[in-house]
Image (cartoon, rainbow, N blue to C red):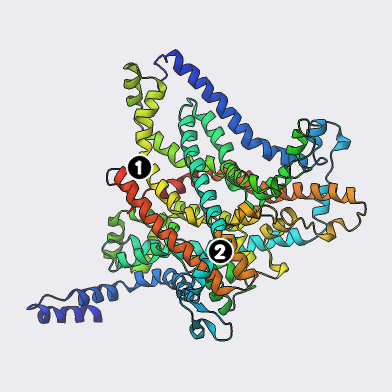
Amino acid sequence: MEELVKAEQTIPVSKPAAPTKLSKNLTYIKKNYILYLLIAPAVILTIIFKYIPIYGATIAFKDFSPIRGITGSEWVGFKHFISFLTSPNFIEILMNTIKLSSFELLIGFPIPIILALMLNQLRKSSVKKNIQLALYAPHFISVVVVSGMVFLFLSPVGPINALLSTFLDKPISFMSDPDYFRSIYIWSGVWQGAGWASIVYVAALANVDPQLHEAATLDGASLLQRIWHIDLPTLKPVMAVLFILAAGGIMGIGFEKAYLLQTPMNSPSSEIIATYVYKRGLLAGDYSFATAVGLFNAVVNVILLGVVNQVVKKLNEGEGLV
Amino acid sequence: MNNQIKHPKGDRVLLLTNNILLTIIVLAIVGPLLYVFLSSFLEPNAIIRKGLSLNASDWSLEGYTRLFTDDTIVRGFINSLLYSTGFTIVTVLVCLFAGYTLSVDGLVGKKVFMVFFLFTMFFGGGLIPTYFVIRDLGMLNTIWAIILPGAVNVWFIILARTYFKAVPNELKEAARIDGASDLKIFFKIILPLSKPIIFVLALYAFIGQWNAYFDAMMYLDDRELHPLQLVLRSILIQNEVQPGMVADVEARNELMRISEMIRYSSIVIASLPLLIMYPFFQKYFEKGVMVGSLK
């Protein structure tokens, strides 16, 4: 009631000069404060767990001392960045990160699309459903279990070596050979994720008007021509968005599986920025240095996302992510 | 789709190839799963060496019985259940609330909120500063370190917002005319209509947390608090079969054989529940992916 009275009183006063945007907004917020209460938990949690750490990342420019805390530690400028960029492992770790994720993108991005196009050719929807059910299953297995399966299958006494033993005199130590790490990482990822990733494409293809295909077939178009001229253009918008996100995330390649599949022997190819940050920071206690490395990674990532977005926009007639 | 039309010969060859390839792919997906399942009852590599034996004496439950002689795996199960349930409740509520607010037309500050949330998807302070915050809040070795830091899921918020936007405005207006408050509208009208989206979000949250290990590894030192995935990690990746499980085994060969069986059975124990349940929920998962892909 009180609010209503107040609102009425302000009308004559504000008549000569239209109410400012600010006061209008304030009355809106007052009237709908419930909405702001509802969003408050999300905002508070985001500030605490996302924005305060961004402030905390200033230790990348300091020599962090646990006694003095984040604010009290001494500023050292770009010392830690320079020491990372000039360290002997810098090139190796950077290249490992870039190689692992670009190969993953190169292989992991097209496979779900091909899979969706293949599934789309199935006539019987019951068959299609069952195949999809099988293809999605690995998505529900944890990354720990998938990595565990990789270790079991590829161990020197595991089934793969047992199968190969007819051709080879001695077992291959897949997990301790840096040459195999990337293939193992990427193909186990395809095994686990490609089916699930195809869902979006399968759904997009379901929206294609069947009459288009019929008309094209009557005109003598072959299956491949119809896929090329009807199906693929349908998928283009989805592909563009997913490609930007995937390519923009190249430097942000996941820690979880790389860390699990890493062994001391394969680290020449498995040590990536994320695992390096974890080891130098939390395991070795080199807080400032590790934060600098992480920050370097995050900044490169944002730049990359922007660049990829612009490039795709150019190629895709102005349609990008943002 | 277009059954009536006769396909050219080239197309039929292509379709046949397609079917063969899909069969191979399905076998490549299901094969390893089946192999793990069978091997958990057989000696390691028995299938490769001797083929699938139908002789009952070759089969044993030893991997399973030994797995349960030690309480780590049971405790991991209980912990995971607790963490996943708690996380699901918190994250679904927080994201539904935020999604509702952001779905309201004409909300003052909507853009600011969106930028505020979206920004965190692309940039963050990193591992160590986040660890510091959680440590300074005294959350290390508590359930809160698992539940709270990941509770705001921007993608969930967008999913919820998209869903709420589709609720007809007339419904809210009618309730408002009847004198219902915003809060009442949300709880009495919007939420009951939102069961599908709540279900989708809850499924995603629960399974995501059930399968996660990273936060627990970072924030929970205490082994008593370890969720299932960390227990599995020590068995599968770090090769630490719990001493309690093999206390009576002395011969090295025997130890290796039994450890191997324990590994296979732990995979089955950990993965089977979800693999059996997910087909029943498949349509909800697909729905979630679809809503999410619409911007």
Evaluate whether residue A218 shows in this view: yes
In this view, the residue in front, A104 or B116, is A104
Q: Along the horizontal axis of the image, is B14 left or right of B40?
A: left
Q: How crowded is mark 2: few (under 14 residues within 10 Å), some or many (20 or more)?
A: many
Amino acid, disc 2 = Phe
The residue lying at 35 percent from left, 67 percent from top is B113
- Residue A272 placement (x, y as % from top left): 57, 57
- Residue A244 placement (x, y as % from top left): 40, 49
In this view, the residue in front, A241 or B95, is A241
The residue lying at 37 percent from left, 44 percent from top is A240
Place residue B220 in its image quadrant: bottom right
On-image quarter of the N terminus of chain B:
top left
Q: Label 1 vs label 2: CA separation? A: 34 Å
Check the image and name the residue furthest to the left: A16
In this view, the residue in front, A13 or A242, is A242
User: Which residue is denoted by mark 1 in the rendering?
Assistant: A237
Evaluate whether residue B219 shows in this view: no
User: Which residue is denoted by mark 2 in the rendering?
Assistant: B87
Q: Along the horizontal axis of the image, is B290 left or right of B83?
A: left
Amino acid, disc 1 = Pro
Place residue B60 in its image quadrant: top right
In this view, the residue in front, A90 or B243, is A90
Residue at disc 2, secondary structure: helix
Residue at disc 1, secondary structure: helix
The residue lying at 63 percent from left, 54 percent from top is A268
Q: Along the horizontal axis of the image, is A254 left or right of A178?
A: left
Examine the rendered structure and indicate whether residue A155 appears above or below residue B49: below
In which chain is the residue bearing label 1? A
- Residue B42 placement (x, y as % from top left): 81, 40
In which chain is the residue bearing label 2? B
